[in-house]
Image (cartoon, rainbow, N blue to C red):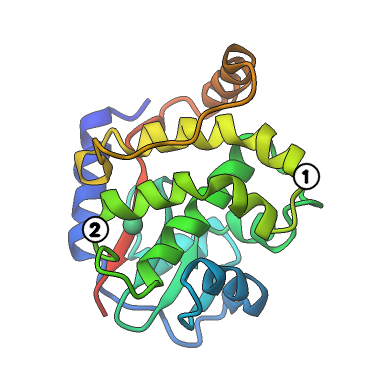
């Protein structure tokens, strides 16, 4: 199991220095117009380019080969509005209703999409992680539906979205005390059981998790 402090330190380093920029023409990274349209909905019409790596290896290369690329869920180049998602989140965002991914990963994909979109949106807090993350969880349910999911799916995924939000907001940069998170409609103990099972499968990489924001 990887010691938690080293992961935290690593991610902090990535946050500060991941300024390599999108690798133009990289073979394993594809532009996705469909997901870009979703980003633009939450960015209030601001144009965005979405780039999807096709593998963990490509995502790692794209990020500058950090030790734990799977811990970075997305990033936004706020100067050019280029948004990138972790390799496995793109297929979910492309077809949420048809995806066979587990509910916790689906919820992460939705939360990350809205989060990155608020980095693209022209508003005064677009560079503030805590404000951006608060908007992401507050718009979670509508996010599921914008992506083509039903109200029932939105209700089912919300507890997982809340768990991810809580985990992300453990990092003070992503924590907003005044954030009014949506209330759950489902039995929390039932969803928590499922999530804990999923976490067990990822033993060793439970750490504060987040995205990367690069100002170029
Ligand atoms: Zn962010």
Q: Is residue 138 above or below residue 197?
A: below
The image quadrant where one finds ligand 1 is: bottom left
Residue 39 locus on image (x, y percent): 53, 69
Residue at the image point whose x is 31% and y is 70% from the top: 123
Alpha carbon distance from label 2 to label 1: 33 Å
How many other residues sit within 10 Å of disc 2, few (<14), some (14-19) or many (≥20)?
some
> Residue visible at 67% across and 35% down?
155
Q: Which residue is farthest right?
A: 98
Q: Nearer the viewer, mark 2 or mark 1?
A: 2
Instruction: Report the number of numbered marks.
Output: 2
Which of the 4 image quarters holds residue 2? Answer: top left
Vertical arrangement, residue 20 with respect to residue 54, above or below? below
Viewport quadrant of the N terminus: top left
- State yes or no: Cβ of the residue under disc 2 lies below 8 Å from any atom of ligand 1: no
Is 3 left or right of 98, judged from the image as shown? Answer: left
Q: Which residue is mark 2?
A: 128
User: 185 or 70, which is in the foreground?
Assistant: 185
Q: Earlier in the sequence, mark 2 or mark 1?
A: 1
Label 1 sits on a secondary structure element that is loop
Q: Secondary structure at mark 2?
A: loop
Q: Which mark is drawn over residue 100?
A: 1
């Amino acid at each position: 199991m990887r010691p938690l402090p080293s992961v935290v330190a690593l991610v902090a380093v990535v946050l500060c220095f991941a300024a390599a920029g999108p690798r133009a023409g990289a073979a394993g990274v594809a532009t996705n117009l469909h997901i870009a349209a979703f980003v633009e909905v939450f960015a209030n019409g601001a144009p965005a380019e979405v780039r999807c790596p096709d593998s963990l290896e490509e995502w790692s290369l794209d990020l500058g080969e950090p030790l734990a690329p799977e811990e970075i869920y997305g990033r936004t180049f706020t100067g050019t509005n280029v948004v990138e998602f972790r390799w496995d989140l793109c297929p979910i965002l492309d077809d949420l209703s048809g995806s066979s991914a587990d509910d916790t990963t689906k919820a992460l994909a939705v939360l990350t999409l809205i989060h990155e979109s608020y980095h693209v949106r022209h508003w005064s807090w677009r560079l503030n992680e805590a404000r951006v993350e608060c908007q992401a969880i507050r718009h979670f349910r509508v996010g599921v539906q914008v992506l083509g999911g039903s109200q029932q799916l939105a209700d089912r995924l919300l507890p997982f979205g809340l768990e991810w939000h809580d985990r992300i907001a453990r990092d003070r940069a992503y924590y907003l005390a005044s954030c009014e998170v949506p209330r759950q409609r489902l039995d929390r103990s039932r969803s928590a059981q499922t999530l804990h099972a999923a976490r067990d499968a990822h033993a060793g990489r439970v750490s504060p998790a987040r995205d990367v924001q690069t100002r170029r």
